[in-house]
Image (tube, helix red, strand yellow):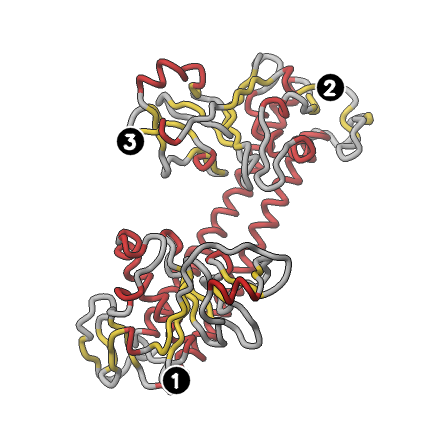
Amino acid sequence: MERYNLYKDSGVEWIGEIPSHWEFKKFKHFISKIIDNRGRTPELVESGIPYIEVKHINGDGYHPNFDTDNFITQNTYDTFLREYLKEGDVLFSTVGSILGKTSIFPPNRKGCIIQNVVGFRFNNLYVPIYMMFQLKTFVDRNHDLLVNNSNFQGSIKVSTFKENLFISPPLSEQQQIVTFLDTKTKLIDSLIEKTQRKIELLKEKRTSLINEVVTKGLNPNVEMKDSGVEWIGEIPSHWLFTKFNRFVFFQEGPGLRTFQFTDEGTKVICVTNITEKGIDFTYKKFISIDEYFEKYQHFTVEKGDYLLSSSGNSWGKVSEYLDDEKVMLNTSTIRLNTLDSSIYNKSLIPHILKSEVVRKQLEILMTGSCQPNFGPSHLNQLVIPIPPLSEQQQIVEYLDEQSQKIDKTISIEEKRIELLKEYRQSLISEVVTGKRKVV
C-alpha cells in the first residue's frame, strides 16, 4: 500500500501525521445528534419495540445482533425515551472493560437504546461507517486512559467526549476508505470465523476421544457388557460400573461474603481462576490470614488437588493445582483427589470429569436454569466405569498424549486468531488515519 505524497503534523499524539489535504476538528463538529437515553432499565415484554444493550453490539461487525428478546411497549418508550434509532446511527458502548464496541444501525429496522450505549448521528459530510472505524481507532489508541477515567466508567460523559480531536478527510476519500476496509475486514473476519470453527471441531474431537476411551478402553477386541445406561452403552466386561465417591474425595468451598475479602492475605480460588489452561490468578481475591486460620483451614487446597468449577456457563472446567502456596476454596469451586491411590489413578480424574459420562449425569442432576450449578451432593450420585489399575495407567498415558497434541493445535489456532485481530486493528488504524493510501 502506498503513502500519500505530503503529510502534516496533526498535533494529536494518537493521530500523528495526516495527509496534508486532510483536516481535523473536534468531534462535536461531526455530529448532528447524540442519542443518549440513559435511565432505568424498563420492564420487558414478549414483543414490541426492540431495545439494544451493550451485549447486542458486535464490536467487530457492522450491525448490532438483533437476535434479542429485549422488547418494550410503546407506552414505556413514550414515557422514558426520547428518540428511535435511524439507519446509519453509530452505536457506541460506554461500559468499563468493553468500552468502545461499535455497530451501525441497519436499514429497515426499528429500535432504541437505553443504558450504557450512546448513538452518534453524523451530519451529511461524513460517512457513518468511516466514523465508526475512526471511533474504534480512537478507543484502541486511548483505551487505558478511557477505562481508568471515572468519566468513562459506567457511562461516558458525552460533553468530555465531544471535545476530542478527530480526522476529517474529504467525503469522497471517506467512501473509498470504507469500500476498501469493508472488503478487507470481511476477508479477515471470514478467516477468523473459519479458524474458530476449526477450534470448536478440535474440542469436539478431544471430548469424543476422551469419552470413547474412558468407556470402551484401548483394546478394540475386548469382550463387552451392557452398562445399563443407554447413553453409555457397553463397557468392557471386566470393568466395574460404580459410584464415583467410592474412589474420589470432593469438597466445595464456603460461601464467602463480599465484606470478607481483603486486599491481601490468604488467596481464595474462585470459579474465574479455573481455566482450561490451568489455574489463572490474574483476578485475585483474599481473606485475612487471621480469619483463614480461625475459620477456614479445612478448606485449604493441597498441591496436586484437582479443582472443578461448579457454577455458571463455564461449569465443568477442571485444572490441577500445582503450587505450594496456601490457598483456600470459595463457593462454586470443588477440590477433588483420590481416597486411595492404589485403587484409582488420580490422573484419570480430569479425563473422567471432561467426559460425557460425567457431564450428561450432571446436566440431569444439577439445578438452576438461569445459573446452572451443582455440588458434592450431585457428585455423590455419579456412577462411572472403573478399569483395573493397570489399564487406568495406560488410558491416562494415551489420553495425556493425545490431548496434548490436540491442545497444541488449538493453541496455534488461537494464536492465529489473535494475529488476525491484531492485523485487522492495525489495518483499520493505518487506513483511517491516512498512513496508507487506498487508491
Dot 3: element: loop
Dot 2: element: strand
Q: Amino acid at mark 3?
A: Asp
> With 239 as the anchor, is 335 left or right in this view?
left
Q: Nearer the viewer, residue 90 or 50?
A: 50
Quarter of image, res 21: bottom left
Q: Nearer the viewer, residue 286 or 324?
A: 286
* Pointer 3 residue: 263
- Residue 240's tag is 2
Give residue 245's position: percent from left, percent from top: 63, 18
Give residue 109's position: percent from left, percent from top: 57, 73
- What is the spatial separation of the Cα atoms under label 3 and label 2, in whole angstroms? 48 Å
Nearer-N-terminus badge (1/2): 1
Question: For mark 3, does the 10 Å Cα neighbourhood hold few (<14), some (14 to 19), or many (20 or more) residues?
Answer: few
Residue at 55% of width from left, 71% of height from top?
Answer: 110
Residue at 35% of width from left, 68% of height from top?
Answer: 135
Question: For mark 1, does the 10 Å Cα neighbourhood hold few (<14), some (14 to 19), or many (20 or more) residues?
Answer: few
> With 396 as the anchor, is 146 left or right in this view?
left
